[in-house]
Amino acid sequence: MSLILDISLKKTIFVGTEKHYFIDYKTSNKFKDDKIYSDSNDFFLLLDGVVLNKRELLQSSSENNWKDYLVESYKKEGDTFFKKLKGSYYGVLYDKKTDKWIIFNDHIGSKYLYHANYEGHVVFSDNYSDLGKYLVKKSIPLSLNIQGAELLLSYGYTFEDITISNEIKRMLIGHYSLITNNKLKFNKFFQLSNNPIEITEDEAIEIIDKKFRNAIKLAFDKDLEYGYKHLASISGGLDSRMVCWVANKLGYNNQLNITFAQNNSPDETIAKKIASDLKHDWLFKALDNGNCLKNIDDVAILSGGNVVSYGLSVQMSMYNHMAFDKTGMLHTGQLGDVVISSYSNSKVQIPYSKNDGAYSSVLMDEMNNLKFKGEYLNQEIFMMYIRGLYGMNQGLAPVQNFTEAYSPFYDIDFINFALSVPLKFRANHNLYKKWILKKYPLAANYKWDKINTKIDNKFKFNIGKREIYIKNLPKMIINKLSRRSGFDNINSMNPLGHWYNNNDDVKEFIDNYYNENISLITNEKIAKFCIKLFNNYSILEKIQVISLLSSVKLLQKINKG
């Protein structure tokens, strides 16, 4: 699935059938009736992805043709006609009578759009690598963006409009592109907010539950509309568990649950037990030994080199062995943890700092030129955008190669309400746990891998803003004394340190990759950072360094054609 849209910003002159734009578009047959590719005398309209409320929108109008409905919506509602769509999508509308282009994606940017300029043209694409290749054909080589490199070595991902190359930018989340009078500008159509409302905790639980069930119904009904079997990830966490559990409760029990994890880790054992008790089909991919980390260059092609590799590596090791022809979208629990709870552990909103959301803080003091473009009212909103929507959403790329992906926690009605619940209720998963215990108590009968116990365990105490469960105290002390990080724990979701220290092949691959490619970094400052991080810090920093090296390799490969 990919799009290349090249629009000339020069004065439009039609000669015969000559056009001032070029489109190369490829897509899959998944959810094909949600997609549109139409070129008429008055409009060009393209829509890719999945629109969960399509049936609802059509039923509320006099139109029963999807394309005609969207065109009429544009005529009545104007440039932001698309913002009533729910789902994961991007699109293009060209009004030929007024010579106006609108290029858009969904509210939270689950499908990124990239853009670049050359010789009076602007080019848009949902595929970073394809856009790079297109620019090279136009004699525009890609060069390393130094700030993008710094972000990869600190945050672990690029964000806002910054990417790993100087020539390509990302469209800001919640914005759309408008081209009129041969000029390009970007307008905002959506902004996350967490202004608290007056509500009791019990009232919040009731509304959270109603809106979550509505979001589940919209997403799972889309599978049924196309005759697909439900595909849902499941782990030892709460988020994916609640998606599978609530969907099952609502009658969507024809589920294939999938898990990728270390053998015998909580992610495997808890997920297996839940899937078995719900009588779902279950597919497990063992990540033992960490051999999946060797696909680092394939990950760079997929992500454009804009995110640290390991999260996408483990996903690719699963999806590359699956057949998706009979299953629908992948239902995930993405961002649930930080929507019903919060990225912030504070019970009151606090200002953000540039360290928030970074994988590694080693280089933060040396990144004095970092300036943020978004409107981030506080730490929670900052983290939701920077780490959540710009960072975590890049993890959708592997599965979007095969099918659509969606989390009910993405539902705009749900996320808007959840973030408006006062933080004093949501902090430390307080509201999340009370919602489960009140509405789905059987789902609380399994451990939560994050705390290694059930959520109703009352044997705990607080250290500052952090909850400590007494049963976990001995292990925490041992880890502290031995200076072990979570990545060294074989039971963690991504036991990178365990793989590196116990699999000679993986250690040799990572070390050799660094030694063979460090010379690719010609910028003295970035080279110094890479050497410092790789040789003196943890496995996480080593992976960040080789991810950057892979990104640079990708830029060079694209430039060679």
Image (cartoon, helix red, strand yellow):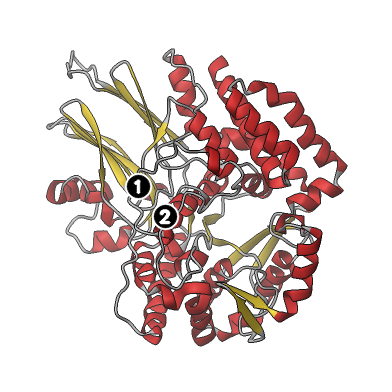
Of the numbered discs 2 and 1, the one sitting upstream in the chain is: 1
Q: In the image, residue 4 lies at what x, y percent? A: 39, 29
Residue occupied by mark 1: 374
Above or below: residue 473 compared with residue 487: below
* Residue pictured at 30% horizontal, 21% vertical: 121
514 vs 371, nearest the viewer: 371
Where in the figure is residue 526, as x and y percent of width and height?
Answer: 59, 29
Comparing 401 with 442, the one in front is 442
**Which secondary structure, mark 2?**
helix
Nearest the viewer among 153 and 66 is 153
Mark 2, residue position: 382
Which amino acid type is marked by label 2?
Phe
| Residue 261 picture quarter | bottom right
Is the C-beta separation of discs 2 and 1 under 8 Å?
A: yes
Q: Residue at x 57, y 62 (%)?
A: 232
Left or right: where 264 falls relative to 540:
right
Residue at 40% in and 38% down:
161
Q: Quote the CA–CA distance across marks 2 and 1.
A: 8 Å
Q: Is residue 34 left or right of residue 181?
A: right
Q: Is residue 334 left or right of residue 182?
A: right
Residue drawn at (49%, 33%) of the image: 147
Residue 366 visible in this rendered orientation of the protein: yes
Is 51 drawn above or below residue 198 in the view shown? above
SS of the residue under disc 1: loop
Q: How many marks?
A: 2
Give residue 62's position: percent from left, percent from top: 17, 58
Query: Mark number for residue 466?
Result: none
